[in-house]
Amino acid sequence: RILSYLKLEKLIEAEGATWLDKELLNRSPERLVQTGFGNETSFALTKRRQWLVAQGFGTSDSASRFQPQPRMLDQLRQRDLRQASETLSTELELKHSHLVEGESITGTFIRSVDLASGKYAVVQKSREFTLVPWRPELEAFRGKPLSGTASSHGIHWNWNVNRSQGVGIS
């Protein structure tokens, strides 16, 4: 299982929701061995907690227990997507189109991007693009048109968009 596409040291000050944040919110966090990667992870968790507090995403008490602000992960994810959208908009010379629940999306899957909040697919339509959560099944559609509908659980893709729509017998 891939926890992040970014290196551990990049996650400490990442603008997005990271697996470090999820671990800080976990009621029964993983026990870490204090050598090797376990030690590096403990250090990263401490630094991430400090960064989150400094950014106003939570507080830390005298026992170093982290108390997050409501909807912290959503706010971090939105911050990550906003920053990535601005960068991609400049790079691709396209306008970013936000995806709204219930809205349909059509376009061509042109590439994927690895963010702190996870991997996303860039779907381009005309002179705009949308960032959508990436799924392995999307790779078969790289450079090809696809369509789907956004819901609170993600995108429900219509994998048959490439089939011709001529006269048929059913």
Image (spheres, rainbow, N blue to C red):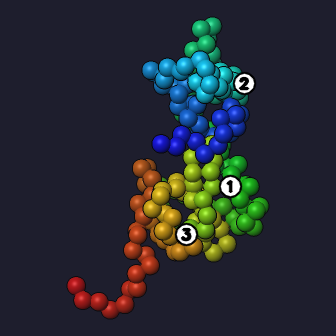
Q: Judging from the image, what secondary structure is the residue with disc 1 in?
A: helix
CA gap, disc 3 to disc 1? Answer: 19 Å
Residue 165's quadrant in the figure?
bottom left
**99 lies above or below 115:** below
Q: Earlier in the sequence, mark 3 or mark 2?
A: 2
In the displayed structure, 47 sits above or below 141; it is above
* Residue displayed at 63% across by 75% down: 126
- Badge 3: few (under 14), some or many (20 or more) residues near its Cα, within 10 Å? some
Furthest-front residue in this view: 36
Please, what secondary structure does the residue beneath circle 3 have? loop
N-term-proximal mark, 3 vs 1: 1
Q: Left or right? Give the position of 164 relative to 25.
A: left
Counting other residues with Cα less than 10 Å from the Cα at mark 1, is it few (<14), some (14-19), or many (20 or more)?
Answer: many
Classify mark 2: helix, strand or loop: helix
Name the residue type under label 1: Ser
The quadrant the C terminus occupies is bottom left
Q: Which mark is residue 54?
A: 2
Q: Which of 2 and 145 is in front in this view?
A: 2
Q: Do the residues under discs 3 and 2 have CB atoms within 8 angstroms? A: no
Which label sits in the foreground, 3 or 2? 3
* Residue 129 image point, x, y percent: 63, 65
Q: Which residue is drawn at 41% across and 60% down?
A: 156
Residue drawn at point x = 29 percent, y = 89 percent: 168
Q: Name the residue under label 3.
A: 142
Q: Which amino acid does label 2 sit on?
A: Ala
Residue type at tag 3: Arg
- Separation of residues labelled 3 and 2 (CA atoms): 40 Å
Q: Which mark is residue 85?
A: 1
